[in-house]
Amino acid sequence: VYDRVLTALRRTPSRGWPLLCVVALTCPPATDGCRRNVDAALACASSDYARYALFVHEVLGAVASPPSEQHIAAFAMRPPSVVNITLVDGEALVEALPVAPWVDCAAVARHLITTRLRLTDARRSTFGLFFADNGRPLNRSEFVGDVHESAFVFKRVLRFLHEPSRSDDPVFERLNFLQCEDDVLNEGRLPIPRRDAGALAALSLLATLGAATPYTVEDLAELTEDISINECYPPLYEDEAPLTLASLAAPHVAAFRKLDARALYREFVDRCRARPLYGAHVFEVDVVGGLNALGAYRLAVGSRG
């Protein structure tokens, strides 16, 4: 079977590559020689069929079942994909995950929720995929094969102002904290008053460094190896002196020092939920008409509209 498919691959690549994907999903090569022939074909794939070659490489020999006729027809609509998905903080969630052309983003998210993370919180369905480069969320009905990207971030698409910050699921609480931390400290999406900035910096430091977190102003200001004090504040504070920022955080480090990880997450999220733009997605837009003042704006879309 593989010999016939590889012959078709050489003669008519547009038909041969989808056929090789289907056969690879159905049964592995029966002999070492057959496997070597397949590997040689994958290594010679042109750029037009690189995604097919990556897909076959990842599914070859894996436990699978023959795709249905409807699934096979999906190869005519889009190519398969192999994707890398991280959490908000950059931690790898899954690497080289093969995604067949009939699998939409909702199905990928369900796989991550149930198989990789084993989330149990009722709000687990609010998670989805985002583009790693521009932060745009993918629609649940979109197909990864329709976009020319392979790097995505897994995080919550929907967060609501009045939802509880507590959960019986510790993984859910950690993911919610990481997303809030990213919104505040990295993206600056959530405006934070100065009176709360020191507390959030202390919570972030303690969640990251644990018992190794310094507690004096001088030691906090000298943090440089893994994390600096400036990194624990929103971008608006990046030009302020480390000693100034350390003096804001030091009293809170002392106050929160005895809290465990989940309590730190909750304290951080509670302070974020108090802000009107909590959970909003922020987009950079260029207004070209309809307003008196045209130009660059930031459009926030959240649970309140």
Image: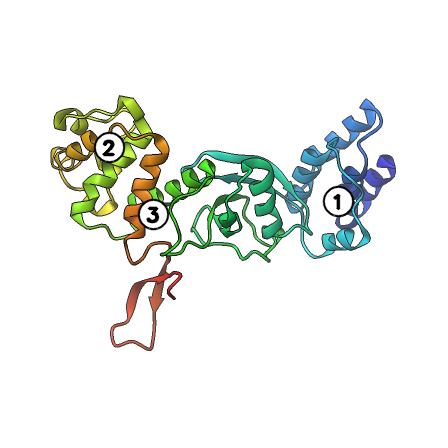
Q: Residue 95: x percent and y percent?
A: 56, 34
**Whole-number angstrom distance, CA of label 1 to CA of label 3:** 42 Å
Using the rendered view, name the quadrant where residue 52 is placed.
top right
Q: Of label 1 and label 2, which has the lower sequence position?
A: 1
Q: Residue 293: x percent and y percent?
A: 25, 73
Q: Secondary structure at mark 1?
A: helix
| Crowd rating for badge 3 (residues with CA inside 10 Å; few <14, some 14–19, many 20+) | many
Marks 2 and 3 close (CB-CB < 8 Å): no
Q: Secondary structure at mark 3?
A: helix
- Foreground pick, 155 / 67: 155
Q: Of label 1 and label 3, which has the lower sequence position?
A: 1
Q: Residue 92: x percent and y percent?
A: 49, 34
In the rendered structure, find residue 256 and report the number of the disc placed on it: 2
Q: Of label 2 and label 3, which has the lower sequence position?
A: 3
Image position of 30 with respect to 12: above or below = above
Task: Check disc 1 and report the residue beneath it.
Answer: 17
Report the amino acid beneath label 1. Trp
Give left or right: position of 113 versus 269.
Answer: right
Report the amino acid beneath label 3. Asp
**Whole-number angstrom distance, CA of label 2 to CA of label 3:** 21 Å
The residue lying at 68 percent from left, 45 percent from top is 49
| Crowd rating for badge 2 (residues with CA inside 10 Å; few <14, some 14–19, many 20+) | some
Frontmost of labels 1 and 3 is 3
Image position of 59 with respect to 270: above or below = above
Task: Check disc 3 and report the residue beneath it.
Answer: 183
Marks 1 and 3 close (CB-CB < 8 Å): no
Dividing the image into 4 quarters, which one contains the C terminus?
bottom left
The residue lying at 73 percent from left, 32 percent from top is 62
- Foreground pick, 144 / 166: 166
Image position of 31 with respect to 187: above or below = above
Question: What is the total number of numbered labels drawn onto the structure image?
Answer: 3
Report the amino acid beneath label 2. Phe
